[in-house]
Image (cartoon, rainbow, N blue to C red):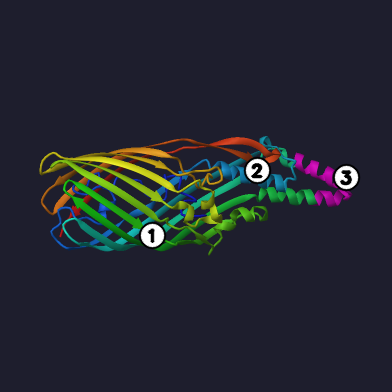
Amino acid sequence: MGNRRRWLRWIKASTKIEYFGSLVQPNQILDSFEQAQSTGNKEEHRRLMTFAIVGGGGKASFDKGLPMFDAAAISLVNTIGQGMLSPNQYTINSAMEGRQYIYGFQLGASYKINEHFAVFAGARMNYFTGGYKGFLDINLKEGVAEQLGAEIVKKLMAAGMTLEQAQQAALQKSQQLNDAKLKLDCDQTGWGLTPIIGIDAKFGKLNLAAKYEFKANMNIENDTHDITAPDAAADFMAPYQNGVNTPSDLPAMLSLAASYEILPSLRASVEYHFFDDKNAGMADGKQKTLKHGTHEYLAGVEWDINKLFTVSGGYQKTDYGLSDAFQSDTSFSCDSYSVGFGGRINFTQALSLDVAYFWTTYSDYTKENVRGLGASIDKDVYSRTNKVFGVSVNYKF
């Protein structure tokens, strides 16, 4: 995997899970205040521990393969067939499935300096697990093998070979085409540590917060169970060989947020995230092709209907700074905006239930590509959809 996004970034909009940190968390404004919060806390010290999926996105299947694999197959046919085959003389059958999750276990502690300020320090251990399986078969249509063989014999005899030599060479080419099959079964793992610091300030009805997550250096290692490919596809399959390590850093992230208590039961908040993707290591230095790091803008409103129920809503806009060189079939992103709603049921002072739903609308990204023989140009349009439903049970000890 070229980076943690190589196979499944099509599922996610980014390496970061898009979410509304406090849409269903009363008395906390978005993500920053999860780390350092003085509001309503009588304790000077608080210890925090969390476990969650912090990146990746899940899994996906492509039963009809991907255009980049078709392009690789066309190149393979061209190499073996010496440019004598046209696309209407063979068929390509391919499929691919992949998965990618980053689990995070976080420990930290906050300290309330005074009635206005609190600080937080901690760290998150990130564990990556992913993998992919796929195949690609190239099959000549009926009668094409004989036709190709005759053309190869004619060409080789014109180059000075005897009939017997040319027939033997043509037979070898035909066998190479019959063996032009790719198969891949690979698991990947890796880990990295993210130090985190935060600060929270409370001035009457106004709450301000900031959080900084340092870059987590992470390498993803292949555990390849099966990799089958002809020699002509060796370079294409090289990144998936067993034991290969690929840089896949989690970028540094700055989060700034502000919340205002309009009424005792009504709060509004805004937040900004910056992910320093351009300085996070990826395969082949791909991060350098980005125009800038990721910018995220968020806003939310939270209303306590009564002591039992709280509802909330929010909006998020994401700009990745994309470029054509960054986008590929197995690793792409699309700028987006998201809208979500949530609710909380407070069963007791200690026990509560959160429910949330949000959907994301993505902007299509169009990229011109050179494919196959003759340097023909076509267009790839990258698009996706995303709908998320979440439930959590919370208990305060």
- Where is residue 205 shown, x and y percent of the image? 17, 46
Across and down, in percent, residue 96 comes to 50, 47
Q: Secondary structure at mark 1?
A: loop
> Which stretch appears magenta?
147-168
Q: Amino acid at mark 1?
A: Phe
Is 149 within the magenta? Answer: yes
Q: From the viewer's side, name the closer residue of 386 and 40.
A: 40
> Residue at position x 67%, y 53% from top?
232
- Residue located beneath label 3 in the image: 158
In the picture of the structure, the residue carrying the numbered disc 2 is 74
What residue sits 45% from the left and 40% below the top?
A: 334
Dominant SS in magenta: helix
CA separation in Å, label 2 and label 3? 26 Å
Which quadrant is the C terminus positioned in? Answer: bottom left
Task: Give the camera-side residue of 9 and 182.
Answer: 9
Residue at mark 1:
214
Q: In screen coordinates, is 338 left or right of 116?
A: right
Q: Closer to us: mark 2 or mark 1?
A: 1
Q: Badge 2, how many Cα within 10 Å: few under 14, some, many 20+?
A: many
